[in-house]
Image (spheres, rainbow, N blue to C red):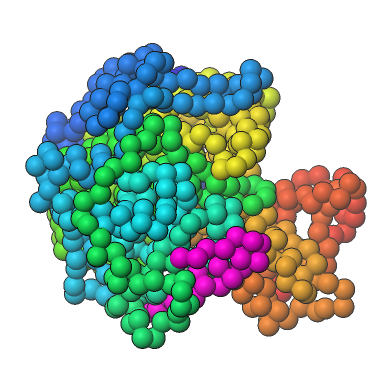
Amino acid sequence: LPVGIGKANQILKNASRSTQPSSTGKITGVNAVVLGEALASEDDELVFPNDDFSRQALVPSLEKYLEMYKWSVEDPAGFWSGIASQFYWKQKWGQPVFSENFDFRKGNIKIEWFRGGITNICYNCLDRNVESGNGDKIAIYWEPNDPGSQDSLTYSQLLQSVCQLANYLKDKGVKKGDAVVIYLPMIMELPIAMLACARIGALHSVVFAGFSAESLAQRIVDSKPKIVITCNAVNRGSKVITLIDIVDAALIESAKTGISVDLCLTYENKSAMKRESTKWQEGRDVWWQDVVPKYPTTCEVEWVDAEDPLFLLYTSGSTGKPKGVLHTTGGYMVYTATTFKYAFDYKPSDIYWCTADCGWITGHSYVTYGPLLNGATVVIFEGALNYPDYGRCWDIVEKFKVTIFQAAPTLVRSLIRAGVEYVTRYPRKSLRVLASAGEPINPSTWRWLFNVVGDSRCPISDTWWQTETGGCMITPLPGAWPQKPGSATFPFFGIQPVIVNEKGAEIEGECSGYLCVKSSWPGAFRTLYGDHERYETTYFKPFPGYYFSGDGCRRDKDGYYWLTGRVDDVINVSGRRIGTEEVESALVSHPQCAEAAVVGIEHEVKGQGVYAFVTLVEGVSYSEELRKSLILTVRNKIGAFAAPDKIHWAPDLPKTRSGKIMRRILRKIASRQLHELGDTSTLADPNVVEQLIALADR
Ligand code: WT7
């Protein structure tokens, strides 16, 4: 058993159920996000699930969880094989069920699950559900940006649409193992495109449609797709964003490096832009509606090995270019389906809505694959969550009678700011489970979500995981045990988290340190595309014998896990991962910027904000205009979501004598913790610090 859980078990048994703090307590701080609140201050607050909820839950008690957890870690092969058998395999996997090497000192890092098993994830998402009699069940409800209309696809219809596109792709020469870049907003064609790739064994590489042309080009160059799938434009709130222009610019850019794409399949998103007004590259661009519907609505599945790649998804690291995280088929399928089912207590009658975009891992695992593998009905939403006003979420919940609602804490914080009236205007009676993912949820935000949105009756699944992990790793199981606001609670089945110290030694009991994982799980990523060495160096070398997450973590006296944020140079802005170095290179590409150092600062709504120290080239003086132009450069190089919240003019940066920037000091200056600068005597020029402080509010 993971350290601490045995003890938690004891404590929970002894805890009196008559003290139910938050479920009966008053709502506090409703309109005030408590900033700087210590994530660690709530160790003793237990929020019990109500008995009715627990009685119907898939895992109704801590005892049941412990029994299953014990089995999952003592006999992973048996545990996961049992679950995997519920899917369709053309041919069963061989022995061993999994093999792994987590220790680079013993050779290359290797993770394999269900090797030899032949299957197809698209078949398991669609055909299997249609064949079992669920063809008429709604697979996807689509809510457009402008309220008032909707669209939907049943499982049979979705299968037919996927087959048509799959046939088209095959006809255009896309084969097993080829990459396809998808640059689409949240319209139904996005999951359709992902599933069509999976059906024919092609790897999809979805690029979030908020990335700039340059970022898109970088990903195209790295993954060398045969085809790019996009749409002409998208509505976002009151804005129209012309995606095809961004793709056009990206393809011009990537062609310069010798990577040219000859086919760009473009969906005409009529409500945003008509084809007549779309800028078009004759010969390269093809309208989806003109070609795809002509293809047959059935398509032979490409059967693949469990270890054949399923998709690539780029994510940011501390240094260097974004990394192409590679997931394979079988393990990912089993893991996303299982985590979806248990972490959200999924029942066939549920209507599930996760606000994440398919451009990020949450949209892969918990908008597309996890739910569809379970035959669930999902809602997807094209627009902005505050459009036409902050009540939109609950309007959508009401419209589709959503039962499970998942969002990032950033959204919740922005709703808190807007005011309770936007929530209470709607009854929200259908809701039964709430979920949060992507960034730490501070206890006051947790309580607001619980008390205001969930009327103190819906458990909250605060799921901790990463692009790399494929699915939830540390998460509450709704109804199984009392929660602590702000804690992701306990590990999922089969996951053995460990907390290590600086030296890489495991620490037991109540402690804090670096969060690592011991031994593999089916959903783990297998490599970084084209760079296995970087995979080993980044994730397996920092603490030999373990997978290193990059996160800091605390385990409290009851064994609950509390994620405390990244310990590397990755920042998390609104649940979106950004490498500080990426922002720095964008800034220094500006002709008037000589040097830049970027750190994360606490942000009331976004969780973290981007704070940039900028040194200008000799002779250039700072101005408001220059500030704007630097921000614009970051928007153009990466995307609007990475734009600095603050530019701090820096005549010089604090460096050691060997020239290394001391970020520790910059973080303190950025957060105005000026009394905690620590030792500055090792700086080449200690006066730099004074200068920076003096310029803090310029
Ligand atoms: C990083 C991974 C949820 C997966 C989608 C984001 C942070 C994620 C939590 C949470 C505290 C969290 C971590 C992690 N994070 N979920 N529940 N509590 N922090 O995947 O873009 O790869 O980001 O997000 O810092 O390392 P990602």
Left or right of 146 on screen, residue 588: right
Q: Does the stretch in magenta take in 495?
A: no
Toward the bottom, the furthest residue is: 277
Say above or below: 534 vs 626.
Answer: above
x and y, in percent, of residue 105 in the image? 66, 20
Total numbered badges shown on the rendered structure: 0
x and y, in percent, of residue 475 in the image? 37, 36
Figure quadrant of the C terminus: bottom right
Q: Is residue 499 visible?
A: no
Left or right of 13 on screen, residue 308: right
Q: Residue at x 77, y 70 (%)?
A: 593
- Range of magenta residues: 236-263
Toward the top, the furthest residue is: 74
Left or right of 107 on screen, residue 22: left
x and y, in percent, of residue 145 in the image? 30, 72
Figure quadrant of the N terminus: top left
Asked where in the image residue 514 lies, by quadrant, the reply is top right
Q: Nearer the viewer, residue 168 or 149?
A: 168
Q: Residue at x 72, y 68 (%)?
A: 589
Q: Nearer the viewer, residue 599 or 585?
A: 585
Q: Does the stretch in magenta take in 240?
A: yes
x and y, in percent, of residue 543 in the image? 63, 27
Q: Residue at x 34, y 78 (%)?
A: 272
Q: Is residue 75 visible?
A: yes
Asked where in the image residue 422 lies, by quadrant, the reply is bottom left
Q: Nearer the viewer, residue 18 or 641?
A: 641
Q: Residue at x 61, y 30 (%)?
A: 540
